[in-house]
């Protein structure tokens, strides 16, 4: 029986069925979002956002299902009892290391378990809003879409932060301060930049870009009570590598996450001091990551007070939601595809085969784009220099990769 389950989890046909269900449900959800955006939002923004929460949850949780139920991935969270009381009950800005192909998915697992998954948002490149399913969902969910101009982006950040933190329920907004996912090549560029500027090089992170954070901070003080620092680590000697492909094949991964809460009111007010605070935070994160890889925990020699371990269990909601969409989409889709394939008409057969091939290519493309080698470059500029303070690339560059991952 175990061998049969393993074979099914690694079956391309089963993966294709999941892709058909996910992308079809995404288009259905996009259609409902569009109708509500045009017909409800102008008259009742609060109700629009409340319904939007459940639509986004229904879409995102299908991916959380893959981690929680399909692959039995485990998430161990290290957080104080005091900080845990606030999780899921207030607006938050998230600062998270960007080290693994699946760090966004592990983050979504945590968000789902504290019941804020439907209101997870991020800074993203403006072009992402035109990508079908995930990009359209983010557009209707009022993500912070940035351009390539610092002055325009500063204005967009202020306007969008004021908008999204008016939501009736807690919103968690992600800022990737490193700007792109960690690779050895980008780490070399980061170390070189730090040495040139007389900064302390980081061993496990890229030097953070600070302008996105400092541009956001004045608006956060008004409506966002706290900043959550998320440090994610996965054992280097794990037999199962943290990739989307392994998750899709049902292989379990164990992830460890340390969560620290910083009240917004305690953060420095000047831009220069706020920038220095962020750099110091990443030096702490670097020591935590180094401690984890050397001793198996974040606290042994990082200088960070130890926090109790909390194992968050998977919830049935993601399983039931995915089962619903599988039944609602696969039943009619497979029925009509089979009719086309076995119609005896070359034209209808070609249409059916073309639809299946399109879904297969969508799945392959999504998996391929999640690979670390596909991530954006670190600090690359036309003049060949590096600028970890660049706003548009620093905040939004790799969120575009995250969108393509899905």
Image: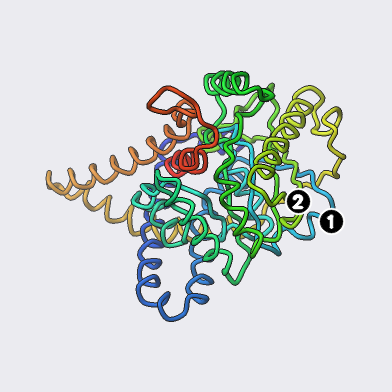
Residue 257 to residue 30: above or below? above
Q: In which quarter of the image is the C terminus?
A: top left
Query: Mark number for residue 193?
Result: none
Q: In which quarter of the image is residue 404?
A: top left
Q: Which of 276 and 370 is in front in this view?
A: 276
CA–CA distance between discs 1 and 2?
9 Å
**Label 2 near label 1: C-beta < 8 Å?**
yes
**Of the residues under marks 1 and 2, which one precedes in the sequence?**
1
Dividing the picture into quarters, in which one does residue 189 lie? top right
Q: Which colour scheme is used?
A: rainbow
Q: Nearer the viewer, residue 69 or 32?
A: 32
Q: Nearest to the eye among marks 1 and 2: give it.
A: 2
Residue 130 placement, left or right of 340: right
> Mark 2 Cα within 10 Å, few/some/many (few <14, many 20+)?
many
Residue at 27% in and 55% down: 336
Residue 250 visible in the current orientation: no
Relative image position of residue 12 (x, y in whole percent):
42, 36
Instruction: Tell me the residue that label 2 is attached to.
Output: 261
Q: In this view, does 219 lie to the left or right of 89?
A: left
The secondary element bearing badge 2 is classed as strand
Q: Disc 1 designates what residue?
A: 82
**x 63%, y 37%: residue:** 97
SS of the residue at dot 1?
A: helix
Q: Nearer the viewer, residue 338 or 275?
A: 275
The quadrant in which residue 302 appears is top right
Q: Which residue is drawn at 39% across and 24% down?
A: 383
Classify the position of the N terminus by image quarter.
top right
Q: Which residue lies furthest to the bottom in this view?
A: 43
Residue 178 horizontal/vertical position (percent): 57, 35
- Tally of numbered tags: 2
- 228 on left or right of 41: right
């Amino acid at each position: 029986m175990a061998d049969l389950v393993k074979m099914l989890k690694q079956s391309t046909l089963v993966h294709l069925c999941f892709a058909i269900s996910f992308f079809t449900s995404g288009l259905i959800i996009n259609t409902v979002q569009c109708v509500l955006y045009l017909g409800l939002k102008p008259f009742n923004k609060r109700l629009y956002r409340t319904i939007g929460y459940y639509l986004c949850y229904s879409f995102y949780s299908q991916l959380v299902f893959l981690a929680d139920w399909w692959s039995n991935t485990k998430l161990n969270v290290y957080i104080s009892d005091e900080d845990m009381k606030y999780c899921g009950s207030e607006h938050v800005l998230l600062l998270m290391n960007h080290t693994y192909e699946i760090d966004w998915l592990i983050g979504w697992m945590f968000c789902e378990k504290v019941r804020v998954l439907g209101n997870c948002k991020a800074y993203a490149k403006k072009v992402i809003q035109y990508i079908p399913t995930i990009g359209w969902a983010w557009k209707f969910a009022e993500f912070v879409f940035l351009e390539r101009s610092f002055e325009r982006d500063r204005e967009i950040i202020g306007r969008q932060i004021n908008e999204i933190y008016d939501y009736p329920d807690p919103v968690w907004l992600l800022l990737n301060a490193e700007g792109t996912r960690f690779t050895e090549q980008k780490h070399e560029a980061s170390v070189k930049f730090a040495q040139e500027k007389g900064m302390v090089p980081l061993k496990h992170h890229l030097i953070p870009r600070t302008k996105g954070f400092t541009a956001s901070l004045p608006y956060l003080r008004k409506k966002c009570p706290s900043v959550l620092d998320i440090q994610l680590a996965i054992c280097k000697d794990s037999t199962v590598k943290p990739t989307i492909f392994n998750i899709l094949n049902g292989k379990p991964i164990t992830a460890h996450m340390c969560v620290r809460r910083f009240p917004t009111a305690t953060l420095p007010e000047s831009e220069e001091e706020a920038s220095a605070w962020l750099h110091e935070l990443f030096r702490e994160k670097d020591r935590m990551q180094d401690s984890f890889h050397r001793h198996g925990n974040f606290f042994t020699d990082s200088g960070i007070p130890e926090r109790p371990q909390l194992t968050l269990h998977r919830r049935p909601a993601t399983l039931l939601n995915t089962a619903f969409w599988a039944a609602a989409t696969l039943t009619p889709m497979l029925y009509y595809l089979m009719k086309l394939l076995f119609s005896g008409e070359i034209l209808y057969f070609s249409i059916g085969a073309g639809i299946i091939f399109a879904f297969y290519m969508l799945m392959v493309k999504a998996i391929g784009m999640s690979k670390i080698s596909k991530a954006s470059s670190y600090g690359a500029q036309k003049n060949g220099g590096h600028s970890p303070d660049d706003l548009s690339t620093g905040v939004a560059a790799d969120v575009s990769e995250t969108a393509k991952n899905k």
